[in-house]
Structure formats: C-alpha cells, structure tokens
C-alpha cells in the first residue's frame, strides 16, 4: 500500500527538500547545499540561517540565485530569532526590524518567496504573551517591505515556544497577507501537541515547513519524546501527508531531520508542568495522550551524543549520522509517502 | 544524591561512602569482551586492569592470548603476579550440538581440556564457558544433556588442575534454574556458575532471582546493568553501563556479599545494542519457556513495570558491520562505559579491594 501511494500520479504533488540544519556539521554553504539537493533529485532547499551563505554580498547572492535556477532547486530563505525579549535573541543583530529587513533582502536576492524565522524557545513560555506582542510589532514594522519584495515571512513553532493555536493568533494579529507559518512537525512534542493537530490548525497558513518524525511513548512522569528519522517514529505520516495535500499542497516539504539527541521527558502528570500551558484546551492535549499511548521508544541504531563538547570520535559519528538519517528520510518521503516532484522525472 | 554529584565527591568522602557500601571485600575486574574492539591481548589487558587499580580480569576467550605457547602463558602468569591482577580464564561454546559450536575445536572434551590447560598455565582457578544462545532453546534438553556429558568427561582433569569450570547463563540460552540443574547433574565439585547479570533479561528473568538461584554455585561473573521497560508487545530490555539501568544493584551486591563474596565481580559492559523486545504478550514467545514457573516470571514483570527506557547518550549501532566513523565511536564508547562502570562499582557499590589501599 505504501509503495502504491508513492506512485499515485493523481495525488497532488508536493515539493520535497531539506532544511540546511539537518546536515549542520558539514558546514556547507549555499552552492554546496544546492548541489547536494540537486544530486538527491530534490525540488527545493531551505537555507534557514544567514550563516548558510558564503557571503551576503549582493553579487554573491545573485550568483546563488542563478546557480539555484541552473540546478533547478527553489530556495526557501530563513533567519533566526526575531523577538528581542527572547532568551535566543542576539543583540548584535541590531533591532528586530533591521534583522527582518536584512533577511527579507537576502531572501529576495536569492529568489526566495518565503523566509522562515521564529520567536524563541520553551524558556520563553513564562512570558509568552509579552514575547508575542513584541514579535507582532516587529513583524508589522516590515509589512510594506515584505509585500513589496514578495517574500512571505514564515514564523516557526520553534523549540517549544508556541503551540499551533498560539502561532495562528500571532499570524492573524501580525497580518496574514504577509506572515504565515513554517510548520515544524517535531517541535509540537515539546508542547505536548500532536503534530496532526498542529497541521490541522496551521494548514491554511503554511508557507514552508520543517518535517521530521518523533518517537513518543508513555513514562511514569507523563510521556517521553525523541526525534527520529522519517518513518522511525510514532507519527502517522500517511495521514499527515494526506491532510497536507488538502490544506497546504503548495508549501515545500523541507525535511529537518534531527537525530542523535536523548529522549526528553514531558512531565505532564506533575502539576508544575502546566504552569506554562494555562490556556491549552483539554481536547488538544487528549490527542497528544492518544499518540503517546500508541507509541513506543525508538528501538533502532542511533548515535546519541551527550551534552556539551563531544569526543572527536563521537562528533565524527554524529556528523555521518546527520547525512545518513537525512538521506533515508528523503527516501521514505519519496517512496513511502509519494512526496517530491523531480525524482519522478 | 545524583550519581554525578556522588562521583564528584572528594576521594576521602568516596572512600568513607564506599566503606559503608555493600561491596566491601569483593574483588573487582572486567571481562575482556567489554573492550573487544581494541583487540588487545593478555599483557595489555593485565596492564590496563592494573592501571585501573583492579584486582582481577577475565580473559574470557582463547583469542585473548597473544599465543598459547606454554612459554608465553608462563610469561602471562608471571606478569599477572607482578602487576597484582588475578586471572579468571575462559573459552566459548562447549555444546557440540549448539548453533554456536565451532567444529574446528575438534571435540567438546578436547576444547575443554585445551581451555583447562591454558587456565592452569596462567594461574587461573576458574574457567568460564557457555552452552549456546537463545537460538538453542528449542533444543535445550538435548543441549543440556550433551553438555553435562562433556563436562563429566573432563572431571578428573579439572579436579587435578584446580580449575573450576564456570558455565555461563549465556545470551538467553538458559534460565538460572536450568543452569543450576546442569551444574548439579555434571558435578558441583568441579562445575560452577559464571553468573551473568545481563543475560537473564533475554530469558525474561530478574537478575536478582538469578543470583538467588545460582549464588551458592557462583565462581566468576559477568556483571552489567539493564534498562527494562514495558512495551506494547510485552517488555523491552537494553544493556547499559552500571548504574544507568533498572536493576537494584545495591540489593544485588548485598545478596552477592551473602552468597558468593569470594567470586570475582567481573564487569562485562555491553552498550550500543538497541533494545530487545520480549513479546511475552504473544503466545509464541512461551514455546521455549514451557517450564518457567509463573512466580519467577512475575518477578521479571515487576521489574519491567518499574523501569523505563535508557534516556542518556549512547552510540547505538548493534552487532553487525559499521561504517568507519560509527565503528570508531563505538570503540571509544566501550572504554568510556567500562570505566564509568568501574567508578560506579567502586564508589557507589563499594566493590573492589586494591583501589581502596
């Protein structure tokens, strides 16, 4: 059945690519990432940080744009944290408005029509409302430029900062004519959200994505989640892609595969856990509980690094794993889920 | 107290804590399989053991020797004495109808005699060996019978050499009750147990129950920890470094102290293998465990219900071929996990003699 779905030519086509973060330890730059994407017969790539470029010089960006056109890879652009109150904000970027403008111009220069960015991380949830207010202001401040450049700003649900419902309210408050979603299917785990719920809520706003699988299972303190390669986890990606084709078929499916990290406990059976989720509806949480009840730990091979600097042998193994796990995830996306256009041609 | 915090304590405090821990007086060492990818030989293993302030080492295979030439073995014996490390010896499968039997060894009796000769030459008083693996359970009665006969055939040589043959509960081949029966049938005057605390998990057995059953017969050991947890098909188990798993090692060492304090505690740390599913909720699982009493299984069930998966860093690559980068990381992990297990055995469980002096 899985193979049949992959060859079903009547299905709505979805472009397939990857987020450069998936193979971060290779430290490749723009042209290398484009060539790698082309070698894998992909349709697109997300250059998700400004450090992905060899240079931000306009002449170099023009060269990147031409190279992308030559090798047939569409670029989704990206920058980092745009909330100055967030723990992840870098003050040396100037103001959020300046940072957003810089990113938009780079995106335009390389021919991208979307630019991923994010608010913060799970550490920002205690002051989430203030962070959202400030982020909305920053986004609104660049509305004219974004519309003029034809680049949609895609706010990611990032590292446990926001649940889908919260991202949706941020997008609508900022202006959905120039702001959309960079839907991440792995980060909902950190906010006890079923990725299918995230897609149901954000689908109409999705511009670009970060797609990966997660192993989710019950634990004496609540549940545990671990990111894994596509097809290795508990998320029903057949249902996910079916819904994706309905609600956001034009958004590129960029795989952001992050393996090699230890499982994380989500202690939702402990009252303190809920301090930063006071507004989450029970029905949404019940969907996550259902997912956890149906799952089990990832039982396959994986190099799981410790915290901080790793010994050289472990670092080398983690680096190799990034590429191996991305490539087998792309294979799963193509052959089991039927995603991607170019590889069929 | 967190394990890390404990290990960061001053050596004086660690010694004081260790003195009150249950492992007082138990000799500490390791099975060479723990660091197999280094491909060291006898003298290197002995020097490594000495550098770790250990009391003993188990050279668990004849491959661990640079040569089986008597002159070389005498040199190994002398070197062991010089560096103050006693040797437990070892060979592999002794059941000639087991799937793991190597016909190149000739007959099983000849293989045992060869092992006993080597053990005697290096000054060992114990020689580990095994029957087979979990693959042999469908044929277990015949395997046990053949193994008992083989063991009985070398009784006089074993008694003359002063080397006790220690049959391991190996890779899910036997539950403790079955090993005990084998030892008693062969003759407990020259056959004992190489108690492995990780392998019982592959046979749905609580390692504490294994120790309770085999304690009086234990001659040498393979000690490691295991993460055990429930799974939709039954339970899953994964071998981990000492202190990282679900086994109550304090209780284990307390019982060890009562039942077999003279047996060397040889750590056999095997990490990097994915969790193994024990699908006991499926009827097919029980085909090879027809005589396991429910009360014994209930002990395992309790362990699984109380445990959870290992959540820490680990290079999980399994048994097969690995790419060079993964193989190098896997090798490094063997040493790191063995050494942090030594730390745990010494400072948390109080095991080992030499490091305290």
Image (spheres, rainbow, N blue to C red):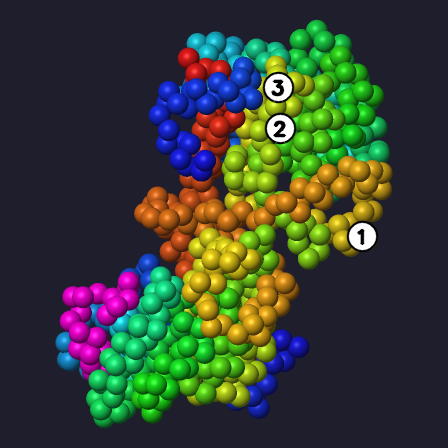
The reply to the same-chain question for discs 1 and 2 is yes
**Which residue does the numbered mark 2 point to in the structure image?**
B252
| Local crowd size for mark 2, using a 10 Å CA cut-off: few (<14), some (14–19), many (≥20) | some
**Which residue does the numbered mark 3 point to in the structure image?**
B257
Q: Nearer the viewer, mark 1 or mark 3?
A: 3
**Which residue does the numbered mark 1 point to in the structure image?**
B284
The range drawn in magenta is: A84-105
Give me the C-alpha separation between circle 2 and circle 3.
9 Å
Q: Is residue A90 left or right of residue B298?
A: left
Q: Is residue A2 left or right of residue A134?
A: right
Q: Chain of mark 1?
A: B
Tell me where residue B37 appears, x and y as whole percent.
Answer: 48, 36
Tell me where residue A231 appears, x and y as whole percent.
Answer: 55, 67
Q: Is residue B164 above or below residue A292?
A: above
Q: Quadrant of residue A138?
A: bottom left
Whether the magenta-drawn stretch holds residue A106 is answered as no
* Residue shown at the point (52%, 86%) measured from the top left: A245
The one of B270 and B17 positioned closer to us in this rendering: B17
| Local crowd size for mark 1, using a 10 Å CA cut-off: few (<14), some (14–19), many (≥20) | few
Give me the C-alpha separation between circle 1 and circle 3.
38 Å
Q: Is residue B325 above or below residue B139?
A: below
Q: How many marks?
A: 3
Q: Is residue B315 above or below residue A234?
A: above
């Amino acid at each position: 059945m899985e193979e049949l779905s992959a060859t079903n030519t009547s299905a709505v086509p979805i472009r397939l690519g990857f987020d450069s973060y998936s193979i971060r330890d290779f430290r490749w730059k723009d042209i290398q990432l484009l060539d790698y994407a082309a070698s894998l017969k992909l349709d697109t790539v997300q250059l998700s940080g400004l450090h992905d470029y060899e240079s931000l010089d306009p002449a170099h960006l023009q060269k990147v744009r031409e190279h992308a056109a030559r090798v047939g890879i569409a670029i989704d652009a990206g920058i980092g944290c745009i909330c100055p109150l967030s723990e992840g904000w870098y003050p040396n970027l100037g103001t959020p408005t300046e940072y957003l403008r810089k990113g938009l111009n780079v995106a335009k220069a390389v021919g991208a029509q979307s630019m991923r960015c994010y608010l913060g991380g799970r550490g920002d949830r205690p002051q989430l409302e203030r962070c959202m207010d400030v982020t909305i202001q920053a986004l609104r401040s660049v509305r004219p430029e974004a519309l003029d450049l034809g680049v949609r700003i895609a706010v990611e649900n990032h590292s446990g900062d926001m649940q889908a419902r919260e991202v949706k309210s941020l997008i609508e408050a900022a202006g959905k004519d120039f702001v959309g979603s960079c839907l991440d299917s792995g980060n909902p785990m950190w906010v006890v959200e079923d990725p299918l719920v995230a897609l149901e809520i954000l689908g109409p706003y999705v511009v670009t994505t970060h797609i990966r699988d997660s192993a989710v299972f019950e634990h004496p303190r609540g549940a545990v989640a671990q990111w894994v390669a596509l097809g290795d986890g508990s998320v029903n990606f057949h249902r996910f892609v079916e819904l994706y084709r309905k609600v956001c078929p034009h958004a590129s499916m960029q795989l952001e595969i992050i393996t090699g990290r230890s499982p994380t406990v989500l202690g939702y059976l402990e009252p303190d856990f809920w301090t930063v989720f006071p507004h989450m509806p029970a029905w949404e949480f019940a969907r996550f509980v259902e997912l956890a009840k149906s799952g089990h730990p990832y039982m396959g091979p994986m190099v799981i690094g410790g915290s901080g600097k790793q010994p050289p042998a472990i670092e080398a193994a983690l680096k190799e794993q990034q590429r191996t796990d991305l490539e087998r995830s792309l294979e799963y996306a193509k052959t089991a889920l039927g995603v991607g256009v170019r590889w069929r041609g | 107290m967190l394990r890390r915090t404990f290990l960061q304590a001053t050596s004086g405090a660690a010694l004081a804590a260790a003195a009150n821990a249950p492992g007082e007086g138990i000799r500490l060492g390791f099975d060479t399989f723990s660091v197999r990818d280094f491909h060291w030989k006898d003298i290197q293993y002995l020097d490594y053991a000495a550098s770790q302030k250990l009391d003993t080492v188990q050279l668990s295979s004849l491959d661990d020797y640079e040569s089986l030439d008597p002159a070389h073995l005498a040199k190994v014996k002398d070197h062991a004495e010089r560096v103050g490390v006693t040797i437990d010896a070892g060979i592999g499968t002794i059941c000639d109808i087991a799937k793991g039997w190597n016909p190149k060894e000739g007959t099983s009796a000849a293989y045992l005699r060869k092992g006993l000769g080597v053990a005697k030459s290096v000054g060992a008083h114990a020689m580990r060996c095994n029957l087979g693996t979990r693959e042999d359970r469908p044929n277990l009665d015949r395997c046990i019978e053949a193994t008992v006969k083989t063991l009985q055939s070398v009784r006089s040589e074993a008694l003359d050499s002063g080397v006790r043959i220690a049959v391991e509960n190996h890779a899910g081949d036997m539950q403790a009750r079955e090993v005990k029966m084998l030892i008693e049938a062969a003759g407990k005057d020259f056959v004992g147990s190489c108690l492995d605390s990780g392998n019982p998990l592959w046979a749905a057995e609580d390692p504490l129950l294994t120790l309770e059953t085999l304690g009086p017969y234990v001659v040498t050991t393979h000690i490691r920890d295991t993460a055990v947890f429930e799974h939709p098909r039954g339970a899953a188990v994964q071998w981990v470094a000492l202190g990282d798993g679900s086994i109550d090692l304090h209780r284990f060492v307390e019982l060890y102290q009562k039942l077999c304090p003279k047996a060397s505690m040889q750590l056999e740390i095997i990490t990097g293998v994915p969790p193994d599913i024990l699908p006991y909720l499926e009827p097919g699982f029980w085909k090879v465990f027809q005589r396991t009493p429910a009360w014994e299984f209930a002990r395992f069930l309790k362990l699984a219900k109380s445990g959870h998966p290992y959540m820490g860093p680990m290079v999980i690559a399994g048994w097969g071929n690995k790419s060079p980068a993964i193989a190098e990381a896997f090798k490094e992990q063997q040493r790191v996990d063995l050494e942090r297990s030594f730390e745990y055995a010494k400072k948390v469980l109080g095991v080992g003699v030499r490091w305290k002096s």
